[in-house]
Amino acid sequence: MIQAAGPAAKFAAAAVATELTQQFLAFKLGTEHFAVEILRVLEIRELSPITPIPNAPSYVKGVMNLRGTIVPVIDLRMRFGAGEATYNDFTVIIVVSCGSRYVGLIVDAMSDVLEVRSSDIAPPSDLSLQVDVMNLAGIIRNNDDIILVLNLDKLLSFELVAES
């Protein structure tokens, strides 16, 4: 029987076994897959009544009452310029934290909770294209799927929250 040589081998094996992982909530907008950090998710709600706000941008659908807290609600499909969605039984509102405020994100469907190794998350700059990746925090390779991780702080900037 051959044994690994000393404490260095044990340390290396432990480092591989405990590679850092992060959890994400994955969801769909049309055929595209997106995700947000699970620690930023307060709750997932079925689509409920939303009170419209006059003169708000088209992607700001209005506000909802979340246990006494007024929460602005944004349709992410419209926010990304992908057109208005037809809401159905799979449509949900993901309530996320943005600083000290909460924002509801309307998405087409929830996919999964993913536990992702840090090595499986590429920085958005890896796209090497002339595209605005400001709203992206990273890109997850999940089998054959590509999942875009949203940068909530950029996407839901203070100005956006203040408008609602």
Image: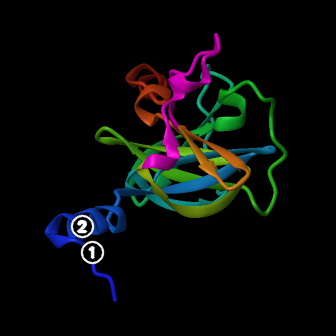
> In the rendered view, would you say 80 is above or below 67?
above
Of residue 69 and residue 142, the one placed in the foreground of this image is 142
> Closer to the N terminus: mark 2 or mark 1?
1
Instruction: Check the image and name the residue furthest to the front.
Output: 1
- Identify which residue is drawn at 32% across, 82% down: 2
Q: Amino acid at mark 1?
A: Ala
In the image, 161 versus 137, the foreground residue is 137
Q: Residue at x 44, y 29 (%)?
A: 161
Residue bearing mark 1? 4
- The segment highlighted magenta reads 119-138
Identify which residue, 4 or 110, lies in the foreground: 4
Label ID, residue 9: 2
Q: Could you say whether the residue bearing mark 1 is in a helix, strand or loop?
A: loop
Q: Secondary structure at mark 2?
A: helix
* Residue at image location 34% in from the left, 89% down from the top: 1
Q: Are marks 2 and 1 in contact (CB under 8 Å)?
A: yes
Label 1 Cα crowd, 10 Å radius (few <14 / some 14-19 / many 20+)? few
Q: Is residue 155 left or right of residue 145?
A: left
Disc on res. 57: none
Report if residue 102 lies within the magenta region. no
